[in-house]
């Protein structure tokens, strides 16, 4: 595992952090990566996150990257430092009310849907811009700290398609960052790139790459 992590880190520019995607992998494997210095891990299922965070060192920074159901918020929000996968207004509103009642700032990324697959989650570009207009004026979102965007490219071997999609995401990210620099001063993170496309992602401004298989091997579903 050391060689795999080292070979990824060696390729990352200083602005890019490695998020080790540990979903479906054992706590033992996570601990192995932790002992090699890795501190950011990402999970996609609330129950699995709960078990792991009880078993593992307290200074791990947990990120959540899965589709989050509103009735699972209290299993996730108290424990994670960043939610990558806010993909609907309903979820955003529910996070906002939880954050408000618990007086806790919640760090989130808005998930942008760019890929060709219908199955992928997230806001379209138009939805994203109209949402940002609403958010900036609404008091109900004062506990929501929007740190940037998350997105996924189409699952394809055609690197031209991935390249085009990441370029598009990067352009939208940069545009929002500039337009909302007053209202969203913490909008700085671009979470793109997984095991098979993170090298393309870092050429397009990724500040967080979400790598699972390349670190831990294939997942056993
Ligand atoms: C599982 C997952 C990853 C990691 O994918 P790998 O191909 O194993 O690197 C990254 N991002 C999200 C949103 C995921 O669900």
Image (cartoon, rainbow, N blue to C red):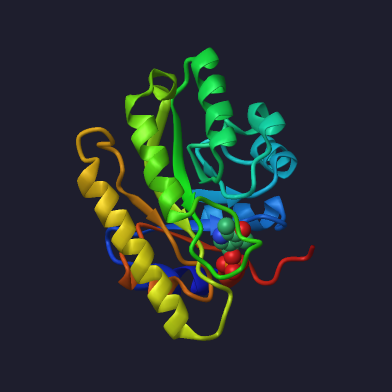
Classify residue 65 as left or right of residue 47.
left
x%, y% of residue 105? Answer: 43, 25
Q: Quadrant of the N terminus?
A: bottom right
Regarding residue 124, the answer to whether it shows in the image is yes
Classify residue 78 as left or right of residue 8.
right
Residue at x 38%, y 31% (from the top left corner):
135
x%, y% of residue 83? Answer: 52, 42
Residue at x 54%, y 28% (from the top left corner):
93
Residue 34 vs residue 109, the one in the foreground: 109
Q: 101 above or below 99?
A: above
Q: 87 above or below 162?
A: above
Classify residue 3 as left or right of residue 31.
left
Q: Quadrant of the C terminus?
A: bottom right
- Image quadrant, ligand 1: bottom right
**Quadrant assignment, res 203:** bottom left
Residue 105 vs residue 219, the one in the foreground: 105
């Amino acid at each position: 595992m050391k060689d795999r992590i080292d070979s990824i880190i060696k390729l990352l520019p200083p602005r890019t952090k490695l998020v080790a995607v540990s979903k479906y992998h054992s706590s033992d494997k996570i601990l192995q990566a932790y002992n090699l210095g890795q501190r950011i891990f990402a999970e996609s299922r609330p129950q699995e996150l709960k078990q792991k965070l009880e078993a593992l060192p307290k200074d791990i920074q947990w990120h959540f990257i899965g589709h989050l159901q509103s009735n699972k918020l209290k299993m996730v929000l108290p424990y994670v430092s960043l939610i990558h996968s806010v993909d609907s207004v309903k979820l955003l509103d529910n996070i906002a009310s939880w954050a408000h009642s618990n007086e806790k700032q919640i760090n989130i990324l808005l998930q942008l849907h760019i890929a060709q697959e219908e199955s992928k989650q997230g806001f379209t570009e138009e939805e994203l811009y109209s949402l940002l207009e609403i958010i900036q004026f609404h008091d109900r979102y004062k506990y929501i700290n929007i740190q940037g965007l998350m997105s996924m490219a189409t699952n394809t071997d055609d690197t031209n398609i991935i390249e085009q999609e990441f370029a598009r995401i990067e352009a939208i990210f940069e545009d929002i960052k500039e337009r909302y620099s007053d209202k969203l001063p913490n909008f700085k993170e671009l979470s793109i790139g997984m095991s098979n496309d993170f090298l393309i992602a870092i050429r397009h401004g990724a500040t967080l790459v979400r790598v699972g298989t390349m670190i831990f091997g294939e997942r056993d579903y």
